[in-house]
Image: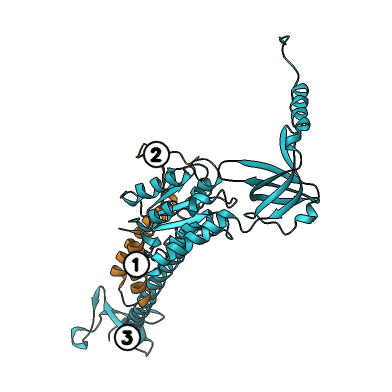
Chain colours: A orange, B cyan
């Protein structure tokens, strides 16, 4: 799941909950799913995945950011 | 140990200075070249005269007469080279500058720009669209040392820490720098590892930026399979690569910003969604509680009326029961009749002389039947 897909699904869940037409059981399920999505999406910010490479002799080599 | 042959720095410097001072051939000579790195400080003009292979540092003590001089001007400079002992520097002391038409490099620039423009290398239709949402890796063609690559790394990491940077280190000025730069562009063009190419260099003189004004670099950019962003010099510097590139960034830092989404904005959006999620769920629970409270009240009301009804029936029955209480009857003047333990309910069961006991509401009386 990409970040954008996650945000989209989260939006849909919130809209359903805000619509007020779901019962407690379904609402709880939606909330749990939404909560999991939020958690995963926050990880996108906290885990910095970007790396720095340099091309040496036409081969990509990992280097430290500093 | 100081060798016997060693002389001091002052001695050698004075010796060099004397060579220049005594060389009559160097006095008041005319030198033809291109002005670069021109600046005036406290009325003194400092600049260099250049041609393709050499550079001559110059100074003009009467800088006020040179206010109209610009970098790139072709001039004939009249003066005398002097060796300055204190700074260990040779400087061409200028008495007079005579303009010699427009600078060669600038002329070349204009000519090449026109040629490439006519050929269609700058056509908007050829430019590739850049979708920054899809950029996961940025290929950078730039110098490995210096502030430029560090600025790009810092800005990209801050705005979107998930984007990779791949650097192809090149010379960004000097002899054959343009070949290096072409190698970098061509490498990334056929390299699946990057989504976009940034060709970056910090600010500099027209000479410094010359590699980015070459035809070979322009053509490498034009034929690249990946979108190319030019990020050369300062905002005011325009180079040929800027016209060919799919996107021109005013500076290397600006390129880093243009190519990365600021995910901190997304972060705020996510914060907002989390708030809405919790609020909508709380609302849902509140609504359910409201419904539950309504049901509880209804049940309580039904139970209340049921209990009231039962109480009424009980009271009614108690009243009836009370009326049957013997004491209540005795209050009306009736008495209970006993013969020993036997309760007498009929006159026929008594005989004359029977000892009978009469029980009233307030006491007992023994009597004999006559």
Q: Chain of mark 1?
A: A
Determine whether A44 is above or below B295 in the image: above
Q: Which residue is mark 2?
A: A62
Same-chain check, marks 3 and 2: no
Question: Which mark is in front, 2 or 1?
Answer: 2
Question: Disc 2 to disc 1, how far (Cα)?
Answer: 34 Å
Question: Disc 1 to disc 3, how far (Cα)?
Answer: 59 Å
Question: Would you identify the image quadrant in which residue B218 lies?
Answer: bottom left
Determine whether B29 is above or below B112 in the image: above
Residue B261 placement (x, y as % from top left): 45, 60
Q: Toward the viewer: B29 or B213?
A: B29
Q: Chain of mark 2?
A: A
Q: Callout 3: 10 Å neighbours few (<14), some, many (20+)?
A: few
Q: Which residue is mark 3?
A: B309
Q: Residue furthest left?
A: B348
Tell me whether the residue at label 3 lies in contact with that at label 2, contact meaning CB atoms closer than 8 angstroms: no
Give the numbered dot on residue A8.
1
Label 3 SS: helix
| Quarter the N terminus of chain A occupies | bottom left
Q: Callout 1: 10 Å neighbours few (<14), some, many (20+)?
A: few
Question: Which mark is in front, 1 or 3?
Answer: 1
Q: In screen coordinates, is A66 left or right of A17?
A: right
Label 2 SS: strand
Tell me whether the residue at label 1 lies in contact with that at label 3, contact meaning CB atoms closer than 8 angstroms: no
Residue B34 placement (x, y as % from top left): 63, 50
Q: Taking the image as drawn, is residue B43 in sight?
A: yes
Question: Disc 3 to disc 2, how far (Cα)?
Answer: 87 Å
- Quick one: label 2 or label 1, which is nearer the N terminus? 1
């Amino acid at each position: 799941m990409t970040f954008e897909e996650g945000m989209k699904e989260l939006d849909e869940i919130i809209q359903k909950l805000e619509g007020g037409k779901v019962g407690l059981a379904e609402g709880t399920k939606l909330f749990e799913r939404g909560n999991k999505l939020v958690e995963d999406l926050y990880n996108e910010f906290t885990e910095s995945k970007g790396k720095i490479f340099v091309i040496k002799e036409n081969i990509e080599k990992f280097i430290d950011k500093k | 140990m100081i060798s016997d042959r060693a002389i001091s720095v002052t001695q050698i410097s004075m010796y060099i200075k004397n060579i220049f001072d005594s060389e009559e051939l160097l006095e008041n000579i005319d030198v033809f070249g291109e002005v670069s790195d021109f600046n005036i400080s406290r009325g003194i003009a400092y600049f260099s005269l250049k041609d393709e292979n050499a550079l001559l540092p110059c100074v003009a003590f009467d800088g006020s007469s040179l206010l109209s001089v610009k970098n790139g001007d072709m001039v004939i400079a009249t003066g005398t080279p002097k060796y300055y002992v204190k700074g260990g520097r040779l400087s061409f002391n200028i008495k007079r500058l005579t303009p010699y038409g427009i600078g060669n490099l600038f002329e070349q620039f204009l000519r090449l720009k026109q040629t490439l423009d006519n050929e269609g290398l700058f056509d908007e239709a050829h430019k590739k669209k850049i979708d920054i949402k899809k950029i996961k890796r940025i290929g950078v063609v730039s110098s490995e040392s210096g502030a430029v690559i560090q600025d790009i790394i810092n800005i990209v990491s801050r705005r979107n820490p998930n984007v990779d940077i791949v650097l192809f280190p090149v010379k960004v000025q000097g002899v054959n720098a343009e070949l290096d730069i072409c190698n970098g562009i061509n490498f990334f063009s056929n390299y699946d590892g990057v989504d976009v190419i940034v060709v970056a260099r910090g600010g500099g003189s027209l000479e410094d930026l010359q590699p980015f004004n070459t035809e070979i670099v322009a053509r490498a950019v034009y034929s690249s399979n990946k979108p190319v962003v030019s990020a050369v010099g300062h905002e005011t510097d325009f180079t040929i690569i800027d016209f060919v590139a799919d996107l021109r960034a005013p500076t290397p830092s600006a390129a880093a910003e243009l190519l990365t989404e600021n995910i901190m904005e997304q972060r705020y959006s996510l914060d907002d969604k989390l708030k809405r999620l919790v609020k909508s769920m709380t609302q849902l629970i509140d609504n359910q509680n409201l419904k539950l409270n309504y049901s509880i009240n209804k049940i309580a009301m039904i139970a209340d009326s049921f209990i009231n009804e039962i109480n009424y029936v009980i009271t009614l029955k108690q009243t009836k029961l009370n009326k049957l209480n013997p004491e209540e009857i005795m209050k009306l003047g009736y008495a209970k009749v006993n013969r020993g333990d036997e309760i007498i309910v009929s006159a026929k069961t008594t005989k004359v002389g029977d000892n009978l006991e009469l029980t009233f509401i307030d006491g007992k009386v023994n009597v004999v039947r006559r």
